[in-house]
Every structure is written in C-alpha cells, then in structure tokens.
Amino acid sequence: VVVNTVLDVEDGDTTSIANLISTPGADNVISLREAITAANNTSGADTVTFDANVFSGNANSLIRLGGTELVVTESLTIDGSSGTNVVITGDAAMDDRLVTGTFITDVDASLQNDPNSLNDNSRVINFDTSRGSLTLSALTVTGGRVTSEVGGGIRLDGDGALTLDQSTVSGNSSTGSAGGIYAESGSVTLTSSTVSGNRSGSDGGGSLRVDRERGWRADPGGNAPGALPWHADAAATAA
C-alpha cells in the first residue's frame, strides 16, 4: 500500500488493505496511520511505501503524528526509499527545538527551553506482537516521548524482530528506560543505521536497550554484547 499524504488522519476503510485502497475516505488519500491499521487487519506480511511525488524532501517528507503512537501488530515493512528523506516525528505541537538543518528533535535544547515542551509528544512506533517482524527502511524516527514508560522512539513489546535498514532513530526520549528503542525480549538488527541522540531518565539505555533473549546485531561490522541486558547509553551505529 502506498502512502500519499503527510497528514496523520484516519477516515478511510482500514478493515483491510484492499478496502483502504478502494475506499480511502473523504480526503481520497492514504495516510501512514491508515496504511498501518489496514496492514494490521490484513493477514500476512505487508509493505508500506511512499508516493515519490508527494514525499519529495524537506517539509514535504515530514509526517507529524497527532498525539498518539503508531501501533503495528502484524509483520510489516515500512520502506521510505521511494520517497526523499522521509521523517516521522512524535512532536504534535511543532514546538520541539530541532538539530540545526534537520527535523530531528534536540531533546536537551527542547527541555532547557521549556521543561514542558515535550508533553505533547507521543511514542512514534509500538510494535506490539508476540511474533513477526518489523522492518524500517530509509526512515528517520524522531520526537518520540513517553513518561513512566520505556522506548520513546520505538518499543518492541514481544518476541518479534525489529530491523533498521539505512534508518535513523534520534531525538527521542523517555523518563523511564531507553529513549530510542526498547526491546523487551525480541531482537534488533541495525544495517547501515544509526541510533543516537536519544535520552532516558533512568536505568541506562539512553539510545537502545535490549533485555534478555537474543540481543542485538549490527551488520556489517557490529559486535554483539557478551551479556544481556545491554544498554547503549550513547549510540549504536552500523555503517
């Protein structure tokens, strides 16, 4: 299914991908949220891509969530390579301070400017399934925020597999553990990707935390930790 709007709306028929394509709603476009919900309701692994004519770069490629996370419950690939520099941010109110020249939230600068400035932000992606895989390709995940929870940018809540390919997770935060990515028991693979510039309030894992089970793998050239849990407080990068 092809996303062809940056707006975070859901007025189409999301009972299946086929129904969404035939009945996209009054706006006659398909949002990322609609595409994910329809994929959740469609059996088997699915792929979400982006209309190159719409996602042409800069602000045209910025998806701003409206205050609630994107929930993935089935195997899914979200492939941003058909667009240009696709960014998904949890900054609903557009009030985050940004890293200069980017749409990436500068967590420290935002909180220094206004301690409440991130209160409108939501987690970006919650991969909530006991099995399956989620692949994010050519995407930037930023502006995610949770309080009294874990995984500000992405949470892997189950035994599934999360893969980041040519993607960036940066500028996310949690008052709990793992501002960037939290994987409770699944696996995380980074391929030509960066997880950095995230912040957490407790328990280490400023950028990435993987508890128990399989751990993480960075391809190529990454070194898996010798013991779990493993906390990457500064950054995890695979070039």
Image (cartoon, helix red, strand yellow):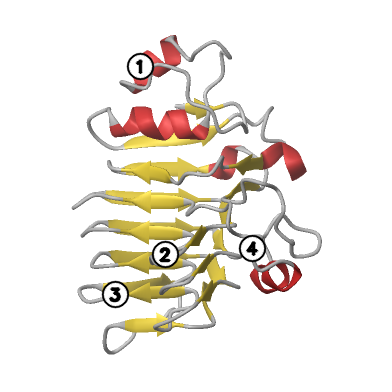
- Spatial CA distance of label 4 from label 2 is 19 Å
Q: Residue 151: which numbered mark, if any?
A: 2
Discs 2/1, front: 2
Q: Is residue 224 visible to us here?
A: no
Q: Residue 116: which numbered mark, if any?
A: 4
Q: What is the x, y in percent for residue 134?
A: 35, 50
Q: What is the x, y in percent for residue 149?
A: 38, 65
Q: Is tag 4's residue or tag 2's residue first in the polypeptide sequence?
A: 4
Kind of residue at badge 3: Gly
Give the secondary structure at mark 1. helix
Give the secondary structure at mark 2. loop
Residue under pointer 1: 18
Q: Is residue 64 above or below residue 228?
A: above
- Spatial CA distance of label 2 from label 3 is 16 Å
Kind of residue at badge 2: Gly
Q: What is the x, y in percent for residue 68?
A: 47, 44
Residue drawn at x 27%, y 27% as measured from the top left: 42
Q: Is tag 2's residue or tag 1's residue first in the polypeptide sequence?
A: 1
23 lies left or right of 161: right
Q: Is tag 3's residue or tag 1's residue first in the polypeptide sequence?
A: 1
Quadrant occupied by the C terminus: bottom right
Which corner quadrant of the image does residue 7 belong to?
top right
Kind of residue at badge 4: Asn
Discs 2/3, front: 2
Give the secondary structure at mark 4. loop
Q: Is tag 1's residue or tag 4's residue first in the polypeptide sequence?
A: 1
Kind of residue at badge 1: Ala
